[in-house]
Image (spheres, grey):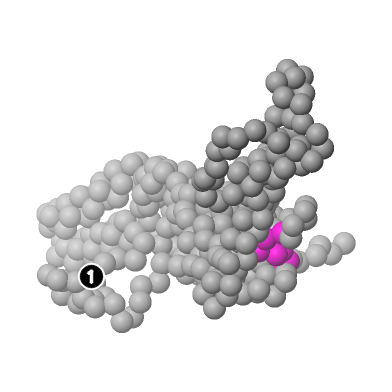
Amino acid sequence: MSTKNTGFQEEKVLKAVSGFGMLFLIVLVMIVSILIPALNSTRPVIGPVLWMIGILLFCIAFVFLFGLKVIHPNEALVLTLFGNYYGTLKHDGFFWVNPFCTAINPTAKQPAEQPAAAGTRSGAAAQSVNKKVSLKTMTLNNEKQKVNDELGNPIEIGTVVIWKVKNATKAVMNVENFKDYLSIQCDAITRNAARRYPYDTSEGGDEKSLRGSSQEVADIMKQELQEKVEDAGISILEVRITHLSYAPEIASAMLQRQQAAAIIDARQKIVEGAVSMVEMALSKLNDTQIVELDEERKAAMVSNLLVILCGNKDAQPIVNSGSLY
């Protein structure tokens, strides 16, 4: 029965040898290699042979030094041996592995045009490239980009993604550069989400919008982004919308529209309150029988109260010192 080859590398955690024991053994071999040529021999042929054995042991011990690896907390080291995947060191500590293993991390490539640091001999030797893959929680700040919402209005939207590498082997083996891969996928998901929802809902609408349902839209973006980067060994912890606004070319018109809607809503509240206050005033006058008003006088009183309560400016009353009629 043949198994289906998905093309993705599964992780194999190495159980490496303790680095302290190997370091002691390497130092011991070096000391022995230095002491061997110092042995006296009556035969002249033995002297060169001892020198060759000492040099050979010293070279072997020196090569074994390259197998010593230090892994800090929340770090991983993906190793290959002659082009084949060898394993991954994930536990923090001091270990020894095959000295011919090579660590790989495409994101750790040092730019060729990087200038030499002050006090160093060359730009290439200025700083050693760290091949370890960080498993710490990191933040991707996706700068604001201009897209059209569901209604075709140009808007500017920016997001921030909180993520971490959960499988270093997949992150290194399955994609060319997992950081660039995440950034591109985040751009695509952000644009796709902005096109599916309007910036704001219409009056009385209950559909989702980018402004009114930002947390729900962010959760949907998180799920979609997680599906896209699952094969890269990346875990998406949170997605937040950090910037949301209309594009500058329509921002002024949309602001006037929002102001008009706000004024209408405020006027509705004022009218509702004024009507309830007038109704209460007429009811109190009728119950206490302070004054009896006919329908014409009631209409005039209602009109005056509504003008006072709904007006933008303070009313200037006119006091009638004559008779009521």
Q: Residue at x 23, y 70 (%)?
A: 126
Residue 81 at x, y = what percent? 50, 65
Q: Nearer the viewer, residue 69 or 67?
A: 69
- Does the magenta-highlighted stretch encompass residue 198? yes
In this rendering, is residue 189 above or below 41?
below
In the figure, residue 218 lies in which quadrant?
bottom right
Query: Can you name the residue that lies furthest to the bottom here?
Result: 113
Residue tagged by mark 1?
126
- Does the magenta-highlighted stretch encompass residue 142? no
In this rendering, is residue 250 above or below 129?
below
Residue 229 at x, y = what percent? 63, 61
Residue type pointed to by label 1: Ala
Side of 131 where 3 appears, left or right: right
Bounds of the magenta segment:
195-201
Q: Residue at x 66, y 63 (%)?
A: 199
Q: Residue at x 72, y 69 (%)?
A: 150
In this rendering, is residue 223 above or below 318?
below
One can see residue 171 in this view: no
